[in-house]
Image: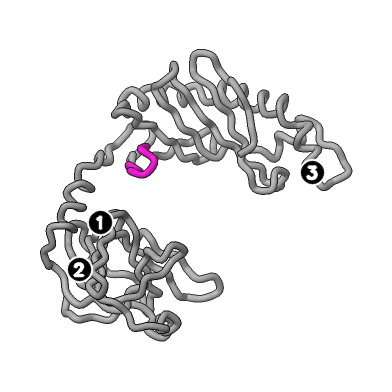
């Protein structure tokens, strides 16, 4: 790739032009930017993100050593392989600090790649020690979320594709995976228990929250409820937190959580 190279919609970036853009060194890391694209509703434009592990502001000298992102508005076509920021590579870029906490960088130009810096290289060394993804026969590719200390996969729960989260408290992911597999093999039985607990604990509350004057029966309430995601840990005899959503917005977008453990069953149901 030839440098320097402009990136993003330059006109769009003019709104940051209250002050001059800064030059940064950034350490690339995290997911492929091709996986971090969101189409702007009603347009053919894509908003793109690339994760970075930290940056150095070459104007102020400020060093920031936590995960954040580069953001830009794509100007044409799809991202090609040469557009991807390579993990473990330091890039010199030009851009504006943006985002809700002023820690994202709205990038306007890639100046060069492959520079060296001890601070940024140290961030990559730490990041590269993270637990690696692995394949599960039941849940597919289990990718690691370093922030939450969980592995995430997918499972067909009675015809509904759900996210399965495997807790990795004190590196117990293998034991938690075994618990999750045991748990999901009996998903029909567990789903029946969960739905009974939801009906018993939340039907009255659903009618209190409902804007309709017509009271819902337990069966009518449950007809709107479906599983959303689940998390399983090896701790406390196989603890679980299972989340359901409702398609009628009964609880104003709040999720229903059902918590307990594999030995004792459901312990409590709440709205989150």
Quadrant location of the C terminus?
Answer: top right
Residue 191 falls in which quadrant of the image?
Answer: top right
User: Percent position (x, y) of residue 122?
Assistant: 16, 52
**166 lies above or below 44:** above
Look at 28% across and 41% down and name the residue there.
Answer: 133
In whole angstroms, how far apart are the C-alphas of marks 3 and 1? 45 Å
In depth, the one of 22 and 62 nearer the eye is: 62
Task: Name the residue beneath numbered marker 1.
Answer: 29
Residue 160 falls in which quadrant of the image?
Answer: top right
User: Percent position (x, y) of residue 141?
Assistant: 33, 41
Q: State left or right for residue 240 relative to residue 221.
A: left
> Closer to us: mark 2 or mark 3?
2
Look at 39% across and 32% down and name the residue there.
Answer: 166
For numbered disc 3, what is the local secondary structure?
Answer: loop
**161 lies above or below 236:** below
Q: Earlier in the sequence, mark 3 or mark 1?
A: 1
Magenta stretch, residue numbers: 144-151
Q: State left or right for residue 69 relative to residue 238.
A: left
Q: Residue furthest top?
A: 263
Q: Earlier in the sequence, mark 2 or mark 1?
A: 1
Q: Earlier in the sequence, mark 2 or mark 3?
A: 2
Q: Residues within 10 Å of mark 2 (few under 14, many from 20)?
A: many
Q: Which mark is residue 91?
A: 2
Task: Name the residue beneath numbered marker 3.
Answer: 210
């Amino acid at each position: 790739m030839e440098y320097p190279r402009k990136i993003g919609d330059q006109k769009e970036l003019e709104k940051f032009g209250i002050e001059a853009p800064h030059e940064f060194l950034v350490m690339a890391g995290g997911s492929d930017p091709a996986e971090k694209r969101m189409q702007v509703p009603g347009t053919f434009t894509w908003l793109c993100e690339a994760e970075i592990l930290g940056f150095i502001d070459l104007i102020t000298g400020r060093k920031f050593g936590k995960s954040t992102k580069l953001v830009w508005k794509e100007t044409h076509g799809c991202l090609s392989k040469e557009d991807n920021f390579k993990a473990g590579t330091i890039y010199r870029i030009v851009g504006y600090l943006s985002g809700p906490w002023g820690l994202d960088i709205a990038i306007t130009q890639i100046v060069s790649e492959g520079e060296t810096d001890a601070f940024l290289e140290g961030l990559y060394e730490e990041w590269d020690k993270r637990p690696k993804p692995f394949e599960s026969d039941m849940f597919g590719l289990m990718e690691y979320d370093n922030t939450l200390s969980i592995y995430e996969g997918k499972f067909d729960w009675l015809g509904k594709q759900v996210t399965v989260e495997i807790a990795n408290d004190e590196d117990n992911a293998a034991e938690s995976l075994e618990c999750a597999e045991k748990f999901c093999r009996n998903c029909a039985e567990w789903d029946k228990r969960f739905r009974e607990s939801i009906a018993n604990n939340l039907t009255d509350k659903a009618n209190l929250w409902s804007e309709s004057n017509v009271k819902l029966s337990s069966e009518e309430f449950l007809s709107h409820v479906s599983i959303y995601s689940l998390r399983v840990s090896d701790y406390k005899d196989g603890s679980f937190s299972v989340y359901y959503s409702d398609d009628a917005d009964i609880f104003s977008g709040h999720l229903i959580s059902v918590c307990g453990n594999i030995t004792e069953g459901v312990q409590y149901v709440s709205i989150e």
